[in-house]
Amino acid sequence: MEHHGGQHYEDLSTDTFPHSSVQIQGPKSSESSCVSIKSDWSVDPPLKFSGHTDPGIRLDHPESSCVSMKSDYSMDPQHNFSGHTDLGFRLDPPESSCESMKSDCSMDPQRNFSGHTDLGFSDPQHAEALKTFRSNLLKKFQCLYEGTAKQGNPTLLNEIYTELFITESENGEINNEHEVRQIETQSRRTAKEDTPIKCNDIFRPLPGQDKPIRTVLTKGVAGIGKTVSVQKFILDWAEGKENQDVQLIFPLPFRELNLMDKTLCLSDLLHVFFPETKEMNLFSDEYKVVFVFDGLDECRLSLNFNVKLCNISESASVDVLLMNLIAGNLLPSALIWITSRPAAADLVPSECVHRVTEVRGFNEPQKKEYFRKRISDQSLANAIIRHLKSSRSLHIMCHIPVFCWISATVLEKMLSIAKRGEIPKTLTQMYTHFLIIQTNIKHEKDYDKKMKNEDMILKLGKLAFQQLVKGNLIFYEEDLRECGIDVTEASVYSGLCTQIFREELGLYQGKVFCFIHLSIQEHLAALHVLLSFLLYKRDVLNENLSSKHAHEFTCHKLSELHQRAVDKALQSRNGHLDLFLRFLLGLSQESNQMLLKGLLTCVRKISYSKGKTIEYIKMKIRMNPSPEKSINLFHSLNELGDHSLINEIQEYVRSGGLSSARLSSSQWSAVVFVLLTSEHLDEFKLKKYISEGQIHMSPDEVLQKLLPVVEASRSAQLNKCDITAEGCAALASALRSNSHLRELSLSVNKIGGRGLTLLSDGLKDPHCKLEKLWLFYCDITAESCAALASALRSNSHLRELDLTQNKIGDKGLMLLSDGLKDPHCKLEKLWFFHCNITAEGCAALASALRSNSHLRELSLSGNKIGDKGLMLLSDGLKDPYCKLEKLRLFDCDITAGGCAALTSALRSNSHLRELDLTQNKIGGRGLMLLSDGLKDPHCKLEKLRLFDCDITSEGCAALASALRSNSHLRELDLSENKIEHGSVKNLSALKDNPHYKLETLLY
């Protein structure tokens, strides 16, 4: 069996906010509000969500979003964490409140967290101070809080936590899309392609990684669970469960470091946050330390890595201290963990980061599991799941745990009491209902009657909009004062709306304010823009975003305001106004106005020409903006209730044959939108969209139009589509675009040497992560192999390459072998079936086998390499660097003469597991030689195929001897040979021999 295009086939003879100048501030309240996830990776790689939590929960102090550590790698380069190895779920006994859940160490000062009686410190005073430090962190981090710390109900973290899905990411990858789009595209990646990392293993190298990890940067969109994973890390350490070779963990959240406007040394900075450490010699060799800086995106400090500071006793500004800690100039042995939203991840230079990880959102099973845990009535939970799946825009957002909580809050109430027509179907409807529910808390709590809904919402909306424009999601007192909110009002607002707007007291006792999630801020910002226009005829979009001549461009009609918002969203490089635009358009709908009227008595019904807004958006789509912008414009049309473009295009997509239709540019954008927002886009098959009849576009042109879909897919199957070199130019562009593409099949296309050269240019790009490339029967010649070899030398991701039935020849094989020898090449599977290769090319290939330890599977079937070629290959197989496990030599003109060299290789190479010699002239003598190799204790061959090899009964006696002494052979194929029945019967009779392990015998 050979491999072709992702499928096995029989041998022919036998039968897929870069960071801008604005300061980026992120909502940490949303971070702590996400559910943690645990998976038993030994059983099932995808996440398994269990437990029940309300993603609106908050930590009692923002400091619980940070951690720090120290490890002396200079002393031990192979340093690893000690402590327990079982990182599975552990449920502590539930208590009625966090106060009743005391640490054992606070009760028994002699107890050691790691189970020993001595902490190992020479100074008893230091040991006692360390116990106090751990105990204090335990008290701060053992609980999550719903609402604010002052008013919320505590929940034990260990009762609701399951391991979050964290995976390694690429250093320096910055996504310019809105976070909602990032979640959408990430959701298409399957968990099987990523290796999970438990939060307690964040500093441990993965198998095969030998370099120590000092600094880790963990990325994730707002509300995805970065802060909760940090809290769990600290709690497990404080309880003595994990990482017990670490003595000190310093949680230093950026949102509080922003308030430290003073010059001081590092120890003084730590004493401010952790007074109990004044009794310790913090930088003693006895201490291993971890610093965790949570919320890089919230940092308002000047991050200048050019100011060098090496003396820990020297005073400097806080930003200088932090930058030099991260860069390793201060405390180079300390471990550093930084969390950030993706848009701010590039604020730390890549050379300062040893590992980049990414926290993902819920996948499909986890979404369902969340609602079934969250809603006790299972029929209601299933109804909520069905409703959310019926709306693509809502379903996409459910990858964010906080949105699952918002949806559960709204739909649990509405599906119980409302008629079907009133149930939210768009994002705007969902968030407007959520705002109404949370505002009603005011009446239930009977707060100050004088505070009107209008006043509260208008002021919060102004704050939301002004800070969204600036890129801030964390606010301080001066930000509130700019919007007419004093601190007293803010406290009342946070009391009324603990699940919308929050006030928190940090470690430094400075007040910090935020909305629970970026999407809540965007909804209120859109509401502010709309109400300012309706109530006061103010065009705040123009006031905030235009020049000093703003009055010349003021909007007088609502449709003009919409057009201004569309333009502003399209002009935004990082897409930070995309969701705001959708909310603004949705809030202008009559249905949402009726909802607002129940909330805000000042709102009057308005009428406007919705058609003008719709036509303006369609015009912008026709102008062909980027795929990301087009997608948001289609979502905006959905908020306006216009599905005309989508409806007219869905029939084309369902029927295929896009090449036979004369589609306009806007219709092609609609095609891309429909495909990109489809539920199952893991594999893209171009054949479905190319008609067999009349063609108005070439397959290359169709491919070019659908390139955003290819980039978003994990596997692209372009087999038998008449793709040429022109199509390869587009594919090369996709490979360079930081796409999700991992598998690409171009088999049975006439791409030729030029096409392969273009593809190779894409493969060399550092953004390319392609792992499997199938080029079966593509008119490739030897000359283009030089470009492919160059790609192999620079791309460490490609693992499988199929060049079957191309005119590679010996020259092409020699060129490719040079690429295989490069240490950057990690190719594991290589197929050269029917490629015009002779013994001359095998010498170069043998040299590659001696220098490349990654190749595991090689097929040279259908090439006339003969005995000489096999001898050369056998020399490579004998080399200790060769780790080849599968070798296929079907129909290669091999005789008994070549089997002697192969036998020698079997005796010296313990890696070869499968050998296929089908349709070669092995004969009885050849089988006797092979049997000698099988008997050797170094031989670990498990599968041997000798189909149609001119074998007679003469060689069966030697084979029987081998089977009596070799316990590894499991499968043997002797079909279509001239073997007498008695000889076969003698082989079968060996089954009672203790060394006989043959499970399958074909004859």
Image (cartoon, grey):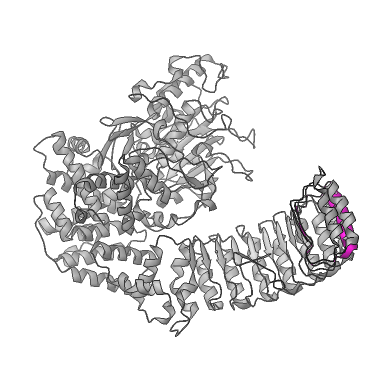
Front residue of 883 and 805: 805
Asked whether 722 falls inside the magenta stretch, the response is: no
- The residue located at (64%, 34%) in the rendering is 76
Q: Nearer the viewer, residue 259 or 737?
A: 737
Q: Quadrant of residue 755?
A: bottom right
Residue 122 lies in what quarter of the image?
top right
Q: Is residue 8 visible?
A: yes
Residue at the extreme bottom? 694
Q: As displayed, is residue 437 above or below residue 266?
A: below
Q: Is residue 986 left or right of residue 214?
A: right
Quadrant for the C terminus in the image: bottom right
Quarter-of-image position of residue 629: bottom left
Q: Is residue 861 left or right of residue 505?
A: right
Side of 994 relative to 409 (left or right): right
Q: Which residues are magenta?
A: 922-950
Quick one: 695 or 57, which is closer to the camera?
Answer: 695
In this rendering, the answer to whether 66 lies above or below 631 is above
Q: Residue 849, how many percent across, how many down?
A: 76, 58
- The percent coordinates of residue 524 (x first, y second) are 22, 50
Residue 891 locus on image (x, y percent)? 78, 70
For the point 86% across and 58% down, the residue is 982
Q: Residue at x 25, y 52 (%)?
A: 430
Q: What is the quadrant of the N terminus in the image? A: bottom right
Residue 262 in view of the camera: no
Q: Nearer the viewer, residue 861 or 732?
A: 861
